[in-house]
Each structure stands twice: as structure tokens, then as C-alpha cells.
């Protein structure tokens, strides 16, 4: 966009807009290659203060050796993969990242058969040693490290799925190390567990264990009595919960459970009762995607209220739900994965600040291109000149992403971008001096059409980048609205559109 055109745009007076809550915004996915598939864990492997990643990979056949890939973070959401390292001599998709031997370096714990295999970190992204210890009956999977007995040493809980997939029986095994002596407690129960989540469900200061049991539509609570755990106490939440996230969603000081229901493709929030159990009746939240399989909690807009991120494999996207602080949620962003969504449900999405900008980002394994996929948080700060209004309309490459940068102070650099449009095609940039929000081609035209900048060529990735220095004579407080639209046979009516932005000049 030329300087002269920007001056023309600000020549008109804009109607004042009502205050709105900013949308949560994520950039399109970035990928780093890994081997096979597995659970993603985030931590600082080499002590440089930048989050790194480990993807626990699996053997193809049950008793073959399995490997994991360590990836060194570059503080910008990208990673450099290390050479695959041996994880176990028997198949298992589960992996945990913790300082198991207390030397200050993160170690890898990988499940295989009825054992957990340890690879000790060297503090530089490499690993040495190869030991194992028993963890239940025949199968041990999906390990999670936590401090079960309050001695500051990491302990472990693993899922023990049944030998035969048709069986409804299963169990968990907790490994503690009081005084440095390894102790195991295996608990069998008649609801097949899928994943285990450590959490203090009854506010007694001890970390309990909650399992999600997909086949039976239940969650089970195992109360912690100082390092030993009760038998299961089950809450029936209905449906087919593929995965859960635990947090205080209604801000009453009691932990709650949010489950993604694979039968209805809804998120269902079950409020904690303060005694370890959760309410049977849930609060439903629409996800928008189909084939929901993974869920994680984070504060993605830094407002102090818990939000949710959900992976949907059929529609190939991640939906971000903004928390309202009362147990209810609303869709705030949908990030398309361009055909790469994971095809296996192998654990929660990893949430961490991958680019050190103070905002929660998302990482997970994607099977479509065998990679670690990262989604960087681009949510605008409350004092930013940009307000994301959502309302994107998916096309061939999913939901196009409209981003802006700069302070909009006189003479300072600015940028407006379109990501994920239709490659080697043309787009129109709609500029409005008011917000109308009218139906258009199956979506919503947010700006009034006061200026139409067209054609703007999209590159081989479907991207457009517009940069310059902000004009010096734009009045403070001036507002306008922006949205990209383009012809696309993948759209509902052969049209696709980006999210809209409201721009307020400081």
C-alpha cells in the first residue's frame, strides 16, 4: 500500500466503534521434521533459556526399538532437529520430560511394554545411559511426571491399558521414590483409562490423579494420601471423552474438567465440586471443527482467564476458545493446518511460550507431514492499534490469516499481511470507514466497502505482504476496518475471506 494511498484513506472521517474484546490470533503453522509419531513435550534441554522440544516416537511393530527426536528451539517458534535417539527396546508412544536424576538437566522417560526406559540428558540436547524399571502389567503408556509425595523428586504415573483392546479393564501405576527408594503402586479398575492427569482436585495441597476413560464416558479420581493413592472414584460425564484439560474454568478456586466429546464434537465443561468429583451435567461449548481429539488449557490472550485449544483432525484445524471466567467459552480463532492434522490421538497439545514474547504458543505432532507443528500466538496487546474481529471464511487452504504490525506512530514502519490465501492468485483489500458486518458469499463482510484495493497478487504460498512507513499527517483517533477477499473454488460460494481488523491510529 503506497504512502499516497494511505493518506487518501485517512482523509475521510470514521464513525466511532463500540468497544470490543480482541480476538485471540495465531499465526499459520510452522513445521520441523521428526521421525514416526509420538507425544510432544516442551522444556529447555540445553540450558540456554529457550524452550526446546522432544517428540517421543514409536516403533511400527510392538517389540521393535522405538526412538525419540529432540529439537532445539530457536526462540522464534522454529526448531532444529537433532539425530533420533533410542528411546526403548519395545514399542510405546508415551514420553515424559523431567529431571529424573536431579542433576539439573532434563531427562527423557519413554514407555515400552511394561517398563519405563530412561535416557539421561547431558545438558546440550543429547542423551546418554539406557536404563529401565517396571511400571505395571504388560503395557505401560502415556507417562506423566509430577511430585506425588512432596519430596521435590519427580515421580511418575503411567496408564496400563488392557492387553486386549476389546476389554474394558485397565489401570494405572504410580512410581514414587521416597528417600530415593523406588516404590510402585498399581491400581486396576473396570473403566479402561486413556490418559492420566495429575491435579489437586479436593484442595488439600496434595496432587491427585484424574484419568479420562473414553470408552465408558467417565473420569476417575484417585485421591493422594501422601504418596499412596485411593482406588478409583468415578464421575459419569457421558459421551465419548477423547481427552480432558483440568483448570479452574469458573474461577471459584476449585479445579474443573473440560472434555472434548468425540461423539458430538463439543467441548463439555464439568465444574468441580471441591471433593474430587465433578458435576455430571456439563456446560457445552461449540468447537466448529469435526473429529476433535486433543485439548489443552492456556491463557492465550493474557487476561488472567483460562482459554482452551482443541485439535480437530477431520476438519484439519485448531480452534481456540476464549474463556469467559464462568465455565463458558466462545470461539475466538480457527487455525487451518493445510492437510497435516494428526491422525492419532496421542496426548494433549503442548502449551508454552516458544518465542519468548510472554504469550502462550502451541506445539503438537502432525502426521500429515511427520513434523512438529508450532502455532505462534499473535494476539494483539490491549494497547495495540489493531483489534482482530475474526470472521474469516475458509477456502482451499483453510482459514486465511490477516496480520498487522507496527505502532502506527508517524514515520514508523507498519505492515499488513495475508497468510494462507490461494497461491498465485489475486486478492482484494477492502478498506472501510465503518463496520457493517453484512452476510457475503457465505461469510461476513466486516468493513463498509469504501475503498477497494485490487488486484493484489498472492505469491506461491498464498501470501501478501504490505509494508511502509506510517504517514505523518494521520489524525490521532482515526479508525478504519480492513479485510482481504479473493475468488477461491474451495470457499462456500467460490469465495474466501480473511479475518477482519479494526485499526485505531494512536
Image (cartoon, grey):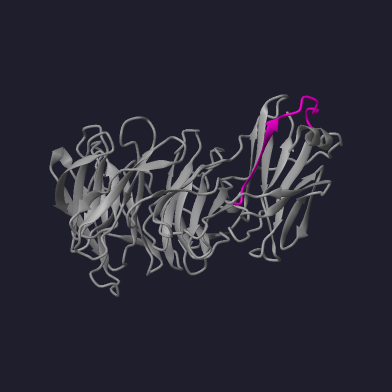
The image shows residue 360, relative to residue 258, as above or below, that is above
Q: In this view, does 290 lie above or below 326?
A: below
Q: Nearer the viewer, residue 87 or 101?
A: 87
Residue 393 shown left or right of residue 247 in the figure: right
**Residue at the bottom extreme of this rendering:** 166
**Does residue 481 lie above or below 423 as drawn?**
above
Residue 13 seen anywhere in this rendered image of the structure: yes
* Quadrant of the snapshot with the C terminus: top right
Q: How many tags in the picture?
A: 0
Question: Measured from the top left, where is residue 72 in percent x and y?
Answer: 35, 39
Q: Tell me, yes or no, if residue 143 can be seen here.
A: no
| Residue nearest the observer in this picture, 59 or 245 | 59
Residue shown at 63%/60% (left/top)? 395
Residue visible at 37% across and 69% down in the picture: 215
Using residue 374 as the reference point, say whether residue 479 is left or right of it: right
Residue 174 included in the magenta stretch of the image:
no
Predominant SS along the magenta part: loop
Q: Where is residue 175 in the image (x, y as percent from the top left)?
A: 20, 49
Q: Residue furthest right?
A: 12
Residue 178 lies in what quarter of the image? top left
Let me know if residue 476 is in the magenta part: yes
Which quadrant is home to the N terminus? top right
Locate residue 190, reporting x and y percent.
28, 68
Q: What stretch is highlighted in magenta?
A: 462-478
Q: Which residue is drawn at 80% across and 25% down?
A: 473
Relative image position of residue 428 (x, y in whole percent): 74, 50
- The front one of 20 and 461 is 461
Q: Nearer the viewer, residue 182 or 400?
A: 400
Specify whether 332 is left or right of 137. right
Amino acid at each position: 500500500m503506497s504512502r499516497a494511498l494511505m493518506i487518501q484513506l485517512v482523509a475521510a472521517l470514521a464513525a466511532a466503534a463500540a468497544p470490543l474484546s480482541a480476538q485471540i490470533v495465531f499465526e499459520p503453522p510452522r513445521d520441523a521434521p521428526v521421525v514416526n509419531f509420538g507425544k510432544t513435550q516442551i522444556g529447555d534441554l540445553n540450558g540456554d533459556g529457550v524452550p526446546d522440544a522432544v517428540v517421543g516416537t514409536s516403533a511400527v511393530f510392538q517389540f521393535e526399538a522405538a526412538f525419540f527426536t529432540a529439537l532445539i528451539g530457536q526462540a522464534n517458534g522454529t526448531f532444529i532437529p537433532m539425530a533420533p535417539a533410542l528411546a526403548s527396546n519395545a514399542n510405546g508412544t508415551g514420553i515424559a520430560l523431567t529431571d529424573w536424576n536431579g542433576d539439573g538437566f532434563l531427562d527423557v522417560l519413554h514407555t515400552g511394554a511394561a517398563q519405563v526406559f530412561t535416557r539421561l540428558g547431558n545438558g546440550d540436547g543429547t542423551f546418554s545411559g539406557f536404563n529401565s524399571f517396571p511400571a505395571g502389567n504388560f503395557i505401560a503408556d502415556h507417562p506423566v511426571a509430577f511430585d506425588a509425595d512432596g519430596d521435590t523428586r519427580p515421580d511418575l504415573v503411567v496408564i496400563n491399558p488392557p492387553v486386549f483392546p476389546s476389554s474394558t479393564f485397565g489401570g494405572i501405576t504410580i512410581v514414587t521414590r521416597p528417600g530415593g527408594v523406588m516404590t510402585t503402586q498399581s491400581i486396576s479398575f473396570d473403566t479402561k483409562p486413556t490418559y492420566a492427569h495429575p491435579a489437586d482436585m479436593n484442595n488439600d495441597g496434595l496432587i491427585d490423579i484424574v484419568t479420562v476413560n473414553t470408552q465408558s464416558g467417565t473420569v476417575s479420581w484417585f485421591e493422594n494420601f501422601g504418596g499412596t493413592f485411593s482406588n478409583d472414584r468415578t464421575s459419569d460425564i457421558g459421551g465419548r471423552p477423547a481427552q480432558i484439560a483440568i483448570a479452574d474454568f469458573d474461577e471459584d478456586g476449585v479445579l474443573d474438567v473440560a472434555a472434548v466429546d468425540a461423539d458430538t464434537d463439543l467441548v463439555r465443561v464439568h465444574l468441580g465440586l471441591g471433593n474430587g468429583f465433578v458435576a455430571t451435567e456439563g456446560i457445552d461449548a461449540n468447537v466448529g471443527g469435526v473429529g476433535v481429539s486433543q485439548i489443552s488449557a492456556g491463557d492465550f490472550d493474557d487476561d488472567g482467564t483460562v482459554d482452551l485449544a482443541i485439535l480437530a483432525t477431520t476438519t484439519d484445524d485448531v480452534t481456540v476458545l476464549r474463556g469467559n471466567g464462568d465455565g463458558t467459552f466462545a470461539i475466538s480463532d480457527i487455525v487451518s493446518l493445510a492437510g497435516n492434522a494428526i491422525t492419532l490421538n496421542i496426548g494433549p497439545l503442548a502449551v508454552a511460550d516458544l518465542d519468548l514474547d510472554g504469550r502462550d504458543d502451541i506445539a503438537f505432532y502432525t502426521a500429515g507431514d511427520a513434523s512438529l507443528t508450532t502455532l505462534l500466538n499473535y494476539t494483539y496487546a490491549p494497547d495495540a492499534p489493531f483489534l482482530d474481529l475474526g470472521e474469516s471464511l475458509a477456502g482451499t487452504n483453510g482459514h486465511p490469516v490477516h496480520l498487522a504490525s507496527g505502532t502506527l506512530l508517524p514515520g514508523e514502519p507498519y505492515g499488513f499481511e495475508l497468510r494462507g490465501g490461494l497461491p498465485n492468485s489475486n486478492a482484494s483489500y477492502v478498506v472501510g470507514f465503518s463496520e457493517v458486518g453484512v452476510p457475503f458469499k457465505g461469510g461476513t463482510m466486516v468493513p463498509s466497502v469504501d475503498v477497494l484495493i485490487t488486484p493484489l497478487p498472492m505469491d506461491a504460498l498464498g501470501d501478501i505482504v504490505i509494508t511502509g512507513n506510517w504517514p505523518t499527517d494521520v489524525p490521532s483517533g482515526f479508525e478504519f476496518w480492513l479485510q482481504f477477499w479473493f475468488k477461491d473454488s474451495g470457499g462456500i460460494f467460490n469465495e474466501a475471506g480473511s479475518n477482519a481488523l479494526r485499526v485505531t491510529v494512536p
